[in-house]
Amino acid sequence: MAALIYSLCALTCLACTVLLWRGWLKAGHRLLFWSAMCFAGLTINNTLLVFDKVVFPVEVDLSTWRLTAAFIALMLLLFGLIWEDE
């Protein structure tokens, strides 16, 4: 059951990335770009979660990589929010 939930979270983040990217291509708002980049990082984070907990539960510890991907994704969004405010 956990594998299904992890996979659905990754697919949801991927769908958000695609929709935000398409919105940015049509409208051209910079905040849509930074949000798409954030969700791309969160997609990587959730994909690493699937690999960490389902594919390689004992052999490999990907928690550091997952946290790094999440941190970079949120920093991209924070940078976009600060830059858009100016």
Image (cartoon, rainbow, N blue to C red):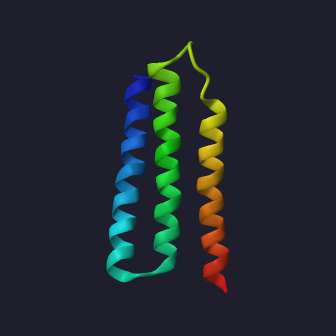
Count of numbered circles on the image = 0
Q: Is 50 displayed left or right of 11 in the figure?
A: right
Residue 77 is situated, as x and y percent measured from the top left of the image, at: 59, 64
Residue 12 is situated, as x and y percent measured from the top left of the image, at: 38, 48
Decide: is 43 above or below 29.
above
Question: Looking at the figure, which quarter contains the N terminus?
Answer: top left
Residue at image location 56% in from the left, 13% down from the top = 59
Residue at image location 44% in from the left, 33% down from the top = 6
Picture quadrant where residue 74 is located: bottom right
- Given residues 9 and 57, the one toward you in this image is 57
Q: Is 64 displayed left or right of 51 in the figure?
A: right
Picture quadrant where residue 86 is located: bottom right
Decide: is 71 above or below 76.
above
Q: Residue furthest bottom?
A: 86
Decide: is 80 above or below 66.
below
Q: Is 34 displayed left or right of 83 in the figure?
A: left
Q: Is 67 displayed left or right of 22 in the figure?
A: right
Residue 20 is situated, as x and y percent measured from the top left of the image, at: 39, 66
Residue 13 is situated, as x and y percent measured from the top left of the image, at: 42, 50
Residue at image location 35% in from the left, 75% down from the top = 25
